[in-house]
Image (cartoon, coloured by chain):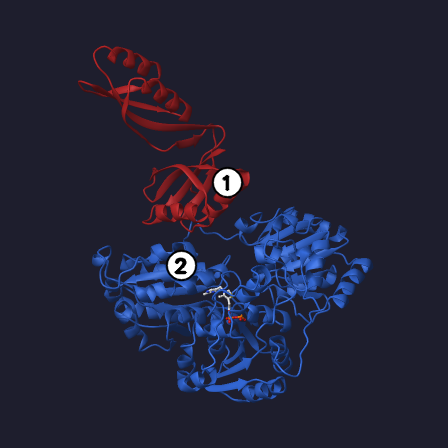
Chain colours: A blue, B red
Amino acid sequence: MRAADAIVKALEYEGVEHIFGIPGGAIIEVYDALYDSSIEHILTRHEQAAVHAADGYARAKGKTGVAFATSGPGATNTVTGIATAYMDSSPLVVMTGQVPKTMIGNDAFQEADTTGITMPITKHNYLVTDERELLKVVREAFYIASTGRPGPVLIDLPKDVTTADIEFDYPVEINLPGYKPKIKGHPKQIKNAAEEIVKSERPIILAGGGVILSNACEELRKLAETIPAFVVTTLMGKGAIPETHPLSLGFIGMHGSKYANYAVMDADLILAVGCRFSDRTTGNVSEFAPEAKIIHIDVDPAEIGKNVRVDIPIVGDAKLVLSELIKYIKYKQRKEWENKVNNWREKYPLKYTQNERTIKPQYVIEKIYELKPDAIVTTEVGQNQMWAAQYFKVSRARQFISSGGLGTMGFGFPAAMGAQVAFPESTVVDIAGDGSFMMNIQELATCVDYKIPVKVCILNNMFLGMVRQWQELFYDERYSETCLRCKEMSFEKIAEGFGAVGMTVEKPSDVEDALKEAFEIDAPIVIDFRVERLENVYPMVPAGASLRDIIDEEY
Amino acid sequence: MKRIIAVLVENKPGVLARVSSLFRRRNFNIDSLAVGTTDREDISRMTIVVRGDDKTVEQVIKQLNKLIEVIKVSDLSENSVNRILALIKVSANTSNRGEIIEIANIFRARIVDVARDSLIIEITGDEDKINAFTNLMRQYGIKEFVRTGVISMARGSKVVEAKV
Ligand SMILES: Cc1ncc(C[n+]2csc(CCOP(=O)(O)OP(=O)(O)O)c2C)c(N)n1
């Protein structure tokens, strides 16, 4: 069988239903094989978007996403997408074309050292130099991408490998002597952790994206209710517990609520699950939760003790460890702590004031939430992302999709596209900034082409808003290169030019009707909300400061 | 602080690049690195000397373990036999050749090449021994110097092996 056909057949074996990509000379054989396959390929308009779409698909569906690109520029265009997935532990298999084996190293046309370039941003990668290894590599790639701590795996396919003739004997067994993810937690450590939890007076659970990746949300909620403990999340952990749950305090960190940050800083015990204590989450790490004993559960041993001191490390899969842990927990009332946190919650709510003249960006998000609380929400990066995280109360895992680790502008729209492909019946909203949306705006063509009815809600402040906010607060309002003012430009017309629906909304009183209308239309839509240009995201922990030093807007 | 780490890896193309890329990316300092296949052709052994505090070295070991092709990582900093091999080309003439050879003998180094105005001396030993000898040779004039990285093996019954 032609190796290209074997690849496609292998993908079918792996249960792949959708692939995002763009063909080219070096990968043309694989595309030829795809022509006869039941797998649906979505032709994006940029390889970066193909990878983000596969990533959005994976995050929404909990299934490995697949992207294709050709050699050279096709492959280098995937880099931002791969790095984004890597930072957020999203399972992907990316296949790239490569020049024929015989030409590798000769600077052949469209040659790039793809495995060299992607080595530090993949969980693993392969350059297939022997066609007899091909199927083994595909099998391993899917296994590695989705197990342990998930991540992107890249397979580089020299053209002559794809044209070779091979036997189709798809391997069942996997033999990776150096890859044995440890998933069962140490029983003694689990017992120790339980003891500390029961003893504690001010416990907090900090849930990260790992809780969602390991499908441990049910276990987490039960544990929280049994202890009982308030739950805060990282940005990536949004959805680990319904944010409407009385024990949920939302997310912590740079733009988390005051009450969530205070609660963490005052805790005497933090049970951290599937998170990596990034600087955006902890603030100044040496001042983080000074009185707390820290229990850290993670499937990746390298995350434990990397950023914060840990008292009880537990290496293992969150779902398994939590279901063990809960067995040893006894309910204990902690009235004083409960009252303290609830008082903070009342005293320091998230707030903004909507006037009659200009639309407040937060208002748009509140309205989206009111009208479509079940929508899958993706975000771009910047203020839009933080307001989305603050005002959209996520009720389930995989509902909130955002580039947390890399902070990639241009992620949200193609990721929304991927999520919509995964869930054609759901409402998928990309909460966007005008700057970010521009970075992958070409995907409107894909959405129109494939009838992917993503709703893009641009919080258009005509600024690179988050950078402008920093300039306002920390650089004496010296707005160096952050103004995107272009009065002549109309996102509405751009959308229409692509064949999508465009809307412009300027008055607060029109926001709700516009959204209602948009949610009724079964087509890709761009709504350009002209929002208050100088609105800032509050509260805020200045970079490098302790979470205690969280500042609010002065009224 | 210097630490010696033994790493068993699958003997595949690109493994060395993966390991060195990891050190660069994570900002770890490699002092020396020695690689060769083991008694098994499909497994290579790297000996890496790293500099850093306990926390750094712990991260080095954990990050190395995450590489798919890394089978085993062991810390051999303590209670191990460590060897470097060095070749030193020293200036020598009729009047001092004897003296140099005498010093070499004391260090159990070997003369492996003799020319009219130079000698090549082969010496094996741990870092301290190599340094001590090298310093003694400076007075005669070192024309050329080459050394391997450290290779290391635990004393006693402890064995670094791949159980596959
Ligand atoms: C690809 C990329 N380039 C630059 C940045 C740095 N950056 C972070 S937020 C931001 C501004 C984003 O502007 P916009 O999309 O309009 O969103 P807003 O903050 O105004 O909501 C920039 C430039 C980034 N995160 N990603």
Total count of labels: 2
Comparing B159 with A232, the one in front is: A232
Question: In the structure shown, which secondary structural element does the residue marked by tag 2 occupy?
Answer: helix
Between marks 2 and 1 in the image, the one whose residue lies nearer the viewer: 1
Give the residue type at disc 1.
Val
Q: Residue furthest left?
A: B116
Crowdedness of circle 1 by 10 Å Cα count: few (<14), some, many (20+)? many
A66 vs A374, left or right, is left
Above or below, comparing residue A84 to residue A37 in the picture: above
Comparing A98 with A254, the one in front is: A254
Is the C terminus of chain A in the top left, top right, bottom left or bottom right quadrant?
bottom right
Query: Disc 2 to disc 1, how far (Cα)?
Result: 29 Å
Query: Is circle 2 on the same chain as circle 1?
Result: no
Position of residue B72 measured from the top left corner of the image (x, y, whole percent): 45, 43
Position of residue A156 measured from the top left corner of the image (x, y, whole percent): 32, 61
Q: Which residue is mark 2?
A: A140
Quadrant of the rendered structure where residue A498 is?
Answer: bottom left
> Chain under label 1?
B
Question: In the structure shown, which secondary structural element does the residue marked by tag 1 occupy?
Answer: helix
Q: Which residue is mark 1?
A: B57
Q: Is residue B98 visible?
A: yes
Give the residue type at disc 2.
Glu
